[in-house]
Image (spheres, rainbow, N blue to C red):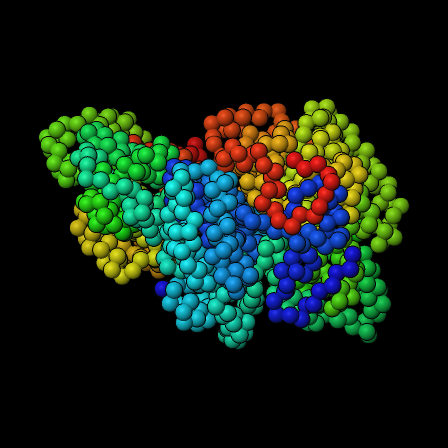
Amino acid sequence: MKFDVNFDVQVPNPRERQRATAYAFGGCTSDLRSGSCAGCLGRCDRSFTQAMFCQMGVSTLISFSTKDSVVIMHGPVGCGSQSHGIDFSIKQYGAARGVKMEGARWLSTNLTETDVISGGNEKLYDTIIEADRRFRPTAIFVCNTCAPGVIGDDIESVVNHAQEQVTATVVPLHCPGFGAKVFSSAYDVVYHGIMHRFGFEPKKYIDYTPFDKSDPDYEIKKQRYEYKKSRTVTLYNAWSIGPGDEKEIKRLLNALGINVNIFVEYKEPDDWRFITETALNVSFCHVHDVYFLEYLKREFGIPYILPTIPIGTEQTVKFITAIAEFFGLEKEAEALLKKETEKLKKALEPIRKNVEGKSVLISGGFLRIGATGLLADEIGLKVVGFRNFNYDEFGDQLFSEVQEKIGDVQNAVSTQANELVNMVYKLKPDIAISHPSVGVWLVKAGVPSLTLFAQRFTYFGFTGAYSLAKRIERTLKNTAYARNISEHTKLPYQEQWYGKSPYHYITGLPETDKPTI
Amino acid sequence: MSFIERPRFSCMLGGALATLTSLPRVIPIIHGAQGCGGQLTNSYAYGGYLGVGYCGGASLPSSNVSEKEIIFGGAERLRKEILAAYDVMDGDLFVVVTSCMTDLIGDDVEAVISEVERPEYPLIFVDTGGFKGNSYYGYDIVIKSLFEQYIPVTKEKDEKLVNLLGLVPAYDPFFRGDLEEIRRILSLIGVKATTFVTPDQTIEDIRNAGKASLNIVLSPVNGIRAAKAAKEKHGIDYIVTDLPIGSNASVKFAIEIAEKLGIDREFAEKALEKEVERYYSYVDRATDVIADTDFQNYAVVVNNATQALPYAQYLDNEIGWLPEYVFITDELREKNKEIIRRHFEELPFEYRPKLVFETDTSKIQQYIIQNDPQFLSDTYYEKLEPAFVLGSSIDRKLSQVLNGNFLNISFPAMSRIILNKTYAGFNGGLALLEDLITAQVSGR
């Protein structure tokens, strides 16, 4: 699909406006797809809402995963206070990638009532100066929160002013929570900040020494450099993508003789200057980074493709094949993928026997859950429903495959726990696969749930498919925990709620003749 | 108030949510942005992996105000949200809490509340706009509001019933176990206690809190507003005392309360005798390993205003360690710092620590490094050795710098899960001794 976006604005549009991303829907896969094509999903909203994440929280992910960065939460002391949890994980998953990370270093400008009345600019300025002095970071990300957002503090000018005094590059992130209903808008906000503040080309005499024309090896050196670049693909990671995932996809592409670079997390901004040393950009999951890839295409002429997310046999084959095609390596890819597919198929056989016919509900980001559904189907599970955090046309290709393979099952767009437990009450899945902080409601409702991503396991590619299948098999081997807790805990919902449709409070749903639940 | 590095607390709304989700069958309704509830739940989770609770996280009704409401006001959105919550959510008490956002828009929440009040759904409003204070204040204001708006005023007082205040869910990570242990100690002298935020509490217990004859505030700074409100509205007297850790502190605490309640001192002392004996018969058999391995340490305590001094007291008075530094990490007004300083001067210490108010983690480390080591010559220098850091998960690095041991006792507590574990009272004193020694032998 055509991706039309204007990079010259100061604040990128939230996705619900930028690409009509939906955050509320209830129905079947076919209705979801036709709704997104016709643009009517964008009209859906809710008259009863529950708490979730905001784009400010999600903005901290890439910010913290940038090597040796500091993050400033410009707001009251509660904004970003969940960041303690990321400290351990960036150190651990950095180490697994061979990168020593400092852990989560952050400051809150700690805005008080007085600051909100008199403006928080001065405090922000002081905090930036101190962040640089105290930590000597590579980058300082400034997350703008609701309070300064509402009173209209001009953080750009504070950042520009402070930039003259500090060594680190200061990046303003316009991410007040109220500014976007679709919280994955955060990725556009962070990439927007990054693309406007950093360079993406190697610097002469700093990063490289130009080849000397009088050098007798000039031609061969030049050719060697150009050949390598022409055989290089760059992949883009994100918080939910683990070191095992990167390793697996790298393994497959390396086997085809393709050189692989991975950006932007777990790299320092100086490394980002090598982003353009590539022939092709590919998104692991374009929910995260299509905004940046489009920018790199317009600015530096680097082509990109969005094949799919490499989860399960079929999507992995598609992903690797698409990249191989670009480099003219279809035949080599076909041979490799055939061999890999056969090996995996054999390994999945015994697992299939143990899990076949069990029903599963999958909840999380739309590309990951769609592909996970196909993998679940591949090993014989019966997918009874999907619950997307949000949804837009970028998912239509994948979900048309999902519909074809799995059938026209329930497919909601929701983050709400009330809708989730109502769905579970009706669909009665044997198991669920869910995004962090969703699983608790499933398990309390009696459904064993495994995490949609857990960076310590591999999820992508062939070895990832095996790993996930094993985790599903393991979870089903003993479901006593979910049974016990559900028998002894009460969910905060009235009995009568389960008698209604889970989509009861969703407004503007398109007319449909399909049975609802 | 200055900027803070890695604050060890969240905002007023964050503390209110941690408290409300720990109260029995309470449904909080947030009037705020969509991220407040989700992310503040993720924040209180780091109080020893304190889960969402009955109605936290993605189950929290939240008006999720966006740009539209900022321009046109959010009152109508809140009205609809409350009415829908009545239909969907199952609870004994609905509590509307606000965020800094909605305070800025200036919605008239009171007006909405009076419009949607229904006799069958008890509903109160607590103004918790983010920038008015931190999570400790959020706790205080919730309990205060319960006394002011929800707990019935009664003349009938139970002279053997007290309320326990001051321990803030999540931000005092052992709050459940500690409150249960304090209640157990009080029961030894025939006193019943309402704890509000432990899992056994019912809404009737909360409503009966007005019958108490004393509010015991276990913190020099938190819970005092609530106690004052209870005094004003319900005529309940209050006492501010330290959280007791270990045998000596527990006996002192129980006697203090007994005297306050007019319980015979001799009876109280007698009642505690057996408990002290039991305590020391356990300590007795720890003495071998302690004596044979030289487990006396220099200690650094990093904790909030409620807990820091009680831990230092335990280390010094009860087990004879050397508390070198006590860092208090919450953001306190000068008046409260002065109260704590004065209290610190009065406390008996064999080895008096240095008391430092510091919110920023890297500055705590800097402070110690600047004072230690002190070179006496090119061969000899003084340093904290052996060192033991009792602090939050983010103080682990300090223990590594000091080449010492580490125990996670304060927020953020991510190095352990905390359910009913206590470090307070008699049982807590033993548990703490166990863990302080276990940390030193766990590699064996």
Q: Quadrant of residue B274?
A: top left
Whether A104 is drawn above or below B150: the answer is below
Asked whether residue A169 appears in the rendered view, the answer is yes
Q: Is residue B6 above or below residue B414?
A: below
Q: Residue furthest right?
A: A331
In the picture, measured across the screen, residue A27 lies left or right of residue A139, that is right
Q: How many marks?
A: 0
Question: Image quadrant for the N terminus of chain A?
Answer: bottom right
Q: Residue at x 56, y 66 (%)?
A: A172
**Depth order, front residue of A400/A342:** A400
- Res B303 visible: no
Whether residue A129 sits left or right of residue B315 in the image: it is: right
Which is nearer the eye, A499 or A8? Answer: A499
Q: Residue at x 47, y 52 (%)?
A: B79
A482 vs B3, left or right, is right
In the picture, the quarter occupied by the C terminus of chain A is top right
Towards the viewer: B349 or A210 = B349
Instruction: Find residue B285 and report its horizontal and vertical position in percent.
Output: 28, 26
Q: Quadrant of residue B204?
A: top left
**Residue A236 in the figure: left or right of residue B93:** right
Q: In percent of the image, x 56 and y 64: which residue is there?
A: A174
Q: Position of residue B383 (x, y in %)?
A: 33, 52
**Residue A451, image quadrant:** top right
Above or below B366: residue B152: above
Q: Residue at x 14, y 30 (%)?
A: B269
Residue A318: percent from the left, percent from the top?
80, 45
Q: Position of residue A417 (x, y in %)?
A: 55, 41
